[in-house]
């Protein structure tokens, strides 16, 4: 499942809710999850708020494609991606990527693939507001 | 029918607008569309372009009804 | 934090509880978690229950050492390991390893290291009970 | 003071006991302790050994007061 949302993301509640409704109980032996969180300091600058913009439509298309590529490359049971947009503060969670699989190797590799490809290709942009200064983040590292 | 043009993030702020519309016959490539709309402003280095929500190149052909987008490197996740 | 327990493990509730009490809010940008779950089929045999035995004392020592090694190798903010013992059923969660770090590369690598080293070195043993047949799992794969 | 010996998992079940105690002077290496306690039963292939909760080898020396353990390959996680 892929979701882009403006409301607060509680990744562990989402994981629990999503896993409870899986109809594949007993089939998966491994879940790997990544959560990305706003830090209070980035590139040597203090961060007070962060604003996330995205290209509606293109983002969804690319996330769906990334999930399809991961499913083709690894034997996965289920995948969950949630990404926030709008205004966030330090310690707010930005993104969750999670993979359920029979075994841990594919779960680790696919979860890493999802977040790396999301960062490389999904059209989101971060703007950081510090003490009196605002700048667009220029590149992902 | 025309070509719809979108700008995102820093590029949208620099241009002071999020969208343009160009009559179709006046442009043939993404680069020509930029030239037509930017009043001589050079395209910032590293700008990415998309046609109909697919990554494209500056020399990619644009057709009537297409949606073209210009944006800085993506920084999600 | 390292815990070995006989009671039910709800990994996502544990992650939420643990993260809430972290005093490093705003410092971590990445959390990677691995959850291992009992499958209903293993090595071609149906599994009805699984029993986990461990060597009290040696297990704790080795888990602490694995965490210390990970902290030496990567710049980590916090680590959580919970492992169950006793009797489990398919879909029960066996183990949780989780890492909080500034950046995702170290979180992914350290989380994988924790579970691989746990599987290689921590003295736990699994016995699987199927339909009328019981066997000790002979090796981790 | 004696040496305490522990068995785990399949090995514990095969021997029918979880622990033994050996008077210290009678054995010097892990292998000798096994020979003394196993009534001629060969040590199963792949058996792991520990002295005082640290992995050790069959020829590792054992001292008074040590805890020696024999167990199959570990399968946690």
Image (spheres, coloured by chain):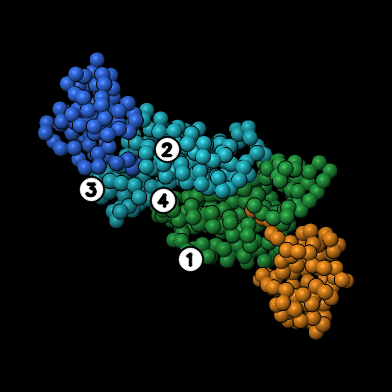
Chain colours: A green, B orange, C cyan, D blue
**Residue that extends furthest to the bottom in the rendered view of this protein:** B25
Residue highlighted by disc 2: C83
For residue A29, which numbered disc appears in the image? 4
For residue C25, which numbered disc appears in the image? none
What whole-number distance in Å separates the C-alpha atoms at marks 1 and 3? 38 Å
Tell me which label, 3 or 2, sits earlier in the chain. 2
Give whichever of A23, B47 is nearer the camera.
B47
* Discs 2 and 1 carry the same chain letter: no
Residue in the image at 78% along x and 64% along y: B44
Give whichever of D49, A2 is nearer the camera.
D49
Quarter of the view holding residue D20? top left
Position above or below: D43 against B32: above
Quarter of the view holding residue A64? bottom right
What whole-number distance in Å separates the C-alpha atoms at marks 2 and 1? 32 Å
What whole-number distance in Å separates the C-alpha atoms at marks 4 and 3? 23 Å
Secondary structure of residue under mark 2: strand
- What is the crowding at mark 2: few (fewer than 14 residues within 10 Å), some, or many (at least 20)? many
Residue highlighted by disc 3: C132
Could you tell me which chain the residue with mark 3 belongs to? Answer: C
Spot occupied by residue C46 in the image (x, y as percentages of width and height):
30, 53
- What is the crowding at mark 4: few (fewer than 14 residues within 10 Å), some, or many (at least 20)? many
* Discs 1 and 3 carry the same chain letter: no
For residue A72, which numbered disc appears in the image? 1
What whole-number distance in Å separates the C-alpha atoms at marks 4 and 2? 14 Å
Q: Closer to us: mark 2 or mark 1? A: 1
Residue in the image at 54% along x and 40% along y: C74
Could you tell me which chain the residue with mark 2 belongs to? Answer: C
């Amino acid at each position: 499942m892929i979701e882009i949302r403006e409301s607060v993301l509680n990744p562990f509640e989402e994981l629990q809710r999503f896993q409870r409704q899986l109809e594949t109980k007993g089939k998966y032996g491994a879940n790997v999850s990544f959560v990305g969180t706003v830090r209070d300091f980035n590139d040597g600058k203090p961060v007070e708020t962060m604003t996330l913009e995205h290209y509606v439509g293109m983002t969804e298309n690319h996330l769906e494609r990334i999930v399809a590529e991961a499913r083709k490359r690894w034997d996965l049971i289920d995948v969950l991606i949630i990404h926030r947009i709008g205004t966030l503060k330090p310690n707010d969670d930005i993104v969750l990527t999670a993979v359920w699989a029979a075994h841990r190797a594919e779960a680790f590799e696919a979860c890493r693939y999802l977040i790396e490809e999301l960062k490389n290709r999904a059209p989101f942009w971060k703007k950081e507001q510090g003490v009196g200064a605002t700048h667009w983040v220029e590149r992902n590292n | 029918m025309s070509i719809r043009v979108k700008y995102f993030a820093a590029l949208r702020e620099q241009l002071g607008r999020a969208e343009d519309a160009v009559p179709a016959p006046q442009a043939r490539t993404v680069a020509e569309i930029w030239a037509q709309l930017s009043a001589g402003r050079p395209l910032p280095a590293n700008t990415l372009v998309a046609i109909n929500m697919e990554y494209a190149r500056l020399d990619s052909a644009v057709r009537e009804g297409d949606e073209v987008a210009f944006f800085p490197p993506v920084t999600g996740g």
